[in-house]
Image (cartoon, helix red, strand yellow):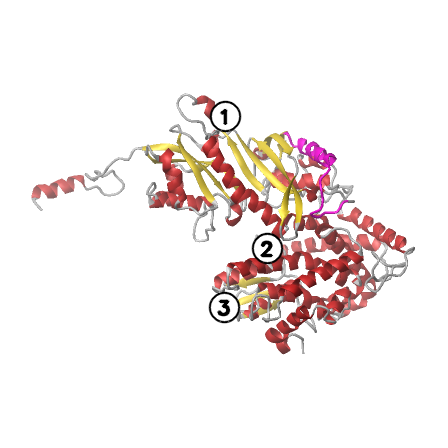
Amino acid sequence: MTESAVAEEALHHVEGGKVEKRDKDFVRVKTHRYAMLCGYQGKNYFGMQVQKPPNAAPTIEGHILDALLKNGWITEKQHDKPYDFYFQRAARTDRAVSAVRQICSMQLPRMDDLPIDGAAKMNNFLPEDIRVFGFRKATGNFHSQKACDARTYSYTLPTFAFAKPDQKTDGHFRMPTTTKTEIDEVLALFLGTHNFYNYTSRRLWQDNSCNRYILSFACGEPFLFRDEFREQDVEFVTITVKGQSFILHQIRKMIGMTIAVVRELQNRSAIQRSFEKERMDVPKAPGLGLLLERLHFQSYDNRYADSHDPISDWGELVEKNVEEMKFTYITKEILETELREQSMMRWLSDLVQNHNFIASPDSETLPDNEFVSGAGKTAKAAREDSDSGAEQEEGTEDQAPVGKGKMFGLASFEFPSLLQVVFVTVMNKVMPLLFKNVKCLVKGCNKEPELCKKDWQKDVVYLVQFPRGPTIPNVSPFCIKATYLRAKKIKYEVIESITARSEHKLLPFIELNGKAIADSQLIIIHVNKHFNIKDYANGKDEAHGRALSRACEHHTFLLVNYFKVLENPAGFVNVLASNFLNNPLFNAFKPFLVPLVAHHFVGKMKARLRAGLGVFSRETMVDLLHRDLQMYEELLDGKTKYFFGDEPTEADLTLFGHLAAVNYINHDCYAKTIIRDKKYPKVSELVQRVRDDLWGDDFEQH
């Protein structure tokens, strides 16, 4: 290098953060601000907004940014920092929430053909449940969130969610016009500007961001959708809400409050009270039916009508593509998933059993449907049931005798007094709170439950469940379902606990490599993925297996518990006591506590059955149970050991868990008689085969 060259290099060399001379090959790229229209089915994603590593979950933005990078329109640095190219979404959707007309704004290299073929290029790198419909040039300072005037969402749900207390909550329900009128009247109470701090989380009443403006809120006309599995038409309805903007959970909680009012679990006045300073526990409806329908940019479109294409209207061709994608990937999927998983039915069951609306623990009076006043009603209804049963004749072989002191036409036990009912119900709510507060004082409050196994070993599954019983590994069918770990030869250890719960308040749950996973089906999904296990031979078997498992857990489970719990509740409580409460203190108060706890179980199970199945006679329940068992009998062809071959799958172990939990406990009931007497021999043989092959001598406690 010559001296002049060295001098030239030294002249332009700068230390620190000063500006250096640009590379001679540097080319300035002209950019433009664009608006992108997209839609997505949100059930497989953890919301719209991208998450940061290392614990990043799949999101819609994550896939969009990947597609932009693969097309060469952004750099790696911009991919990691989207705000560097002014990427912004108009509305942030939560986990499992879908959208059909989401708008994103961004600064990209100027490309004349982007509005023409940009959507197709993006879709080449996107999954089928995320679609881009088009790009349009926008003004240089266009910001999709700030320019949006309003947002329209829809919520689709089965109409049985609005069934009255004297109507059956099932797929045969058809919503009367009077109920639709009532829904519209209730929805109208949300119109205008209100403080929605009771409809979100982690915000105070004084926070001005809780004030939101609702422009319209209306219920559409009911429509039918075919449930192929149950071979019936189920009625659905779509509720549409338009607001200036919404806060986290607001729409789902407005829907939840509307359902509670229409189902007569709350008064209409509770809606007005929910806007006031008192804290109220507003129920949150499931996220499945929520859909971002449309974003409104009227002010922007009017202001720049002469120079730019509108953002609110993309033309007939694009709108046709949007509607096709909406039905194929979103609306149809919402309806089919609801029918398959019964998320609204399960939510209604929990709403009836566990939810209360207490605004303040210091209130002098309780709402009409609070847990204390509800306990009195339950006791009164129980006595009325028993008195009305006194005039009936003795039942047939499949029907328990009915008489004075019998509950719901089932086996007798002594009814507790109203004072006892109130005492137990209050303590059922108060004791967990006291325990939680004492624990916080002693150990400090944690946002997440602590690990039960702190000195865990890599790839060892720690199964946290109820204590085992003398004749069975567990009284809970969902804990027995964890036999799956044995079937797949996964190394695991059992941690028995009465008080431990997952963050979702469930048992069983597992801890794997320092992470807790709750719910039996999610446990199986997680261990399959972690240990690379293929449970089924092909996709068709997996689909059939999933349908079988869900039918067992959401239908057969309720039928079995009708007989196991309601026919002899005191006997069932004695079984629980022998597992969990076998100590001198409990035994001393056993004559007093057993009727009370039995009454508690009867109330919860009756509510769950009413929400999950409907109110039927015992004869009908017997028939339904036989139909379920006959279905399993037909699906077991007898040529193989299990449903899908000679190796057990989740479907086999789900059925085993629910039938073993009634067949092998020291508690007689009608459901146990059917299995024990082998009226469905292939079903009974499957239960015995799983016990022998996977448990052997470990099944009973020695």
Numbered badge on residue 262? none
Q: Are the two marked residues, 1 and 2, in contact with CB atoms closer than 8 angstroms?
A: no
Give the SS element for disc 3. loop
Q: Amino acid at mark 2?
A: Glu
Q: Earlier in the sequence, mark 3 or mark 2?
A: 3
Residue at 35% x, 44% y is 69
Q: Amino acid at mark 1?
A: Gln
Vertical side of 388 occupied by 249: above or below: above
Q: Amino acid at mark 3?
A: Gln
Q: Which residue is mark 1?
A: 298
Tell me: 189 left or right of 386: left
Residue at 59% x, 66% y is 643
Q: Earlier in the sequence, mark 1 or mark 2?
A: 1
Q: Which residue is mark 2?
A: 503
Q: Which residues are magenta?
A: 167-191
User: Exactly how many numbered labels are in the figure?
Assistant: 3
Q: Which residue is mark 3?
A: 457
Please state the horizontal and vertical placement of residue 296, each as a whole percent of the image: 51, 30
Residue at 43% x, 39% y is 132
